[in-house]
Image (cartoon, helix red, strand yellow):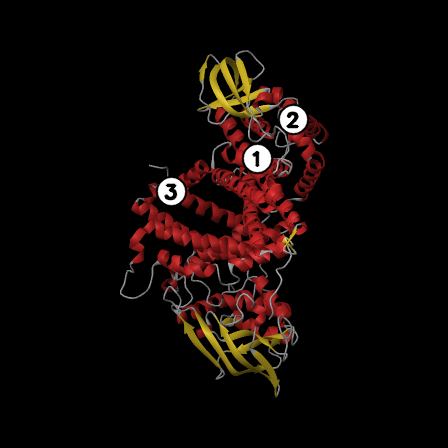
Amino acid sequence: MKLGFSPADEAFRAECAAWLQAEMTGDFADIRGIPNLCDAIPRRKEWEQRLGQAGWSCIGWPREWGGRDATIAQQVIFAEEYARAGAPNRINHIGVELAGPTILAFGSEEQKARYLPEIAAGRQIWCQGYSEPNAGSDLANVKTKARLEDGQWVVNGQKVWTSLAHYSDMIFVVARSEEGSAGPKGLSFLLMDMDQPGIEVRPIRQINGEAEFNETFLTDARCAADAMLGAAGEGWKVAMALLAFERGVSTLGQQMQFRNELDAVIDAAKANGKAADPVVRQKIARAEIGLRLMRYGALRMLSGTDLAAIDGAALTYKIQWATWRRNLGELGMEVLGQAAEVAPGDHYSWPTLPNLFLFSRSDTIYGGTNQIQRNLIAERGLGLPREPRGQA
Amino acid sequence: MEFAFTDEQAMIAETVRGFFAENATSERTRKAMAADGIDRELWSSFANELGLAGIGLPEEHGGAGLGMVEMALVAEAAGAQVAALPLLGHVMIGQAIARGGSEAQKAEWLPRLAAGELIATAAWAPKLSVADGRISGTFPFLPHGASADLLLVHSGSDAWIVDLKGAGVSVEAHVTMDQTRPFATATLDGAQGEQLADGDAAIAGALAAGWICLAAEALGGAQATLDRTVAYSKERVQFGRQIGSFQAYKHRLADMMIEIEQARSAVYWAACAVDEGSDEAQVALHSAKAFCADTYFMCAGNMIQLHGGIGFTWEHDAHLFFKRARSIQTLLGDGQWHREQVASAVLGAAA
């Protein structure tokens, strides 16, 4: 058992750090440090393409599809250096981290050739069509319908909380393709062009005033019959496999962002004297400890030989970081006091810590609420019996 | 990236888990609780048959070599059974001598410690006076103090070993809430101390080992409370359902697992950091001690609650975990103190 990385890995770190630092202080200095996914989109599309040209877009993928066959350790290092350099959050993270790996796992060679090079080059932004007004925590309750007509899927329904849909090129849609089916059976996993008359996107304003996510209406929206991963009616398997990719190596890059957020709280406490308050000191220490333990939990999860331990660390990771970040948002407000409740400008827009306070309320909801996480932990991690289900 | 157990470490873990599960039974532990809190037969097989008392001690002095990671594996397994063993004082004095003793001191003490011939205890933040190598002072809350042969004390940058059976020493045993690790008070009145060659190294080694030992015991104990409560929740039926199928119940178990997984990262981060001489070692140690102790206490409290009335009985083992957890929270610095050390590292010292 070791804490650090090998000398070869550290050499790799130096290489990617140098490139990232140069870009973030050079051509792309104007988008450095943007945390959200809704500002400066045209420039950030250019950044996605720069990553693609330089081969840094999806380093964990196979070389033949635009990746570098990077080891897990290298992916961890890149994610850390990416955040350390202040590079903006990836607007195509759904394409790179979810759609790509799922296509690699389930796609035909023809499908791989059609989508992967475009994603790797940063030319194709993806969004995720999972949730619906009546399919949130109960995702299998999808009502959006798909029927085959003249060699095309014709899709009708509504998706919601579709992050980034307003500038995405593609969407993967979980739709009910078997008439009369219910629950996880009879669903298909479709890959659809966003640029078509049958798809309408309406932004949803969030509690922090920004609009990263949307309602997506599908009205006779179309895609080719073979624009589908897995077999017709077996989309649930694909949809669930995709979710497993969500807790990949990007978690460590995400932690570097958390580090920056905790540092902002620490700096604020030092600046206004709260750093001397013993109660605040205890809370900052708890946050510091929590962040360190997240790092070593993630390393444990990614290091890989002790399967039982990995499952435990991986299964508990989402609720752990989401709760940590929500607590940090609250601590930031406590440290800053009332000053944090007044916006610096004349419109409803917030600096880092007040924004964190508001935004982090979503962390414990999206990607499986804390309550759903506890169900998963109890049922999959501890083998507890399932709660009896109500009528669908 | 290899933050996972090696094959050898996994084998040690399996061996010690089996050893404690088979030998540190509730019946034997309760027998020890009625006496001085030490299962002598367990201690003897621990040291002699398995050679586990030598873990973390150099091989040239009768030890088994290895380091804090392996020591933590042992403490984790012991904690899972709330074993009645004088492990805490043992690892503290062992590391004090291994890291801060002269060659002669190592040669004198380590083989006997590795063989389990001596029982040791250690004082936390002691106040003492020294004149011509003779030590005076009162040392409360010594774990297994009434049974110990040796006492480790320190002051500033100096550390001493005191023979508790020698002249100028009186020891008073106390009825203690956690009967698996009862406290005693030693009063020294000009007792002869043997000063260790490098006091700073001895103190740092002893504290690191003590904190890791307690954190690892807490991890093992917390996991055991979860495992036992999960098993109970599948057996017990109310309202026509296994009680483990109720969300109010399973969410508390999930919360235990969430904390325990972090505690596991904490213990092995700290142990690795000490073994590797990492800059992070001090923050890791304070984090591990504070976090694991709190986790254990939360889990042990839940164990009682989730067992209902039976969990409140003397007959059930829940109280063994609960009392050990409470004791670990305060031993070698409470959570607030450890978190303040972490705060000092990130914010600077308190005003």
* Residue reaching furthest to the left: A346
Q: CA distance from mark 1 to mark 3?
A: 27 Å
User: What is the distance, in whole Å, between disc 2 and disc 1 at their CAs?
Assistant: 25 Å
Task: Report the chain holding disc 1.
Answer: B
Query: Could you say whether the residue bearing mark 2 is in a helix, strand or loop?
Result: helix
Please tell me which residue is depicted at 68% across the width and 36% down the height of the picture: B20
Residue A330 seen in the figure: yes
Amino acid marked by disc 2: Ala
Nearer mark to the viewer, of 1 and 3? 1
Q: Residues within 10 Å of mark 3 (few under 14, many from 20)?
A: few
Residue A203 place in picture, x, y as percent: 41, 73
Q: Which mark is residue B324?
A: 1
| Residue indicated by mark 3 | A279
Between residue A50 and residue B221, name the one nearer to us: B221
Crowding around mark 1 (Cα neighbors within 10 Å: few <14, some 14 to 19, many 20+) is many
The residue pinned by badge 2 equals B114
Q: Are the residues under badges 2 and 1 in a single subunit?
A: yes
- Marked residue chain, label 2: B
Residue drawn at x 46%, y 59% is A19
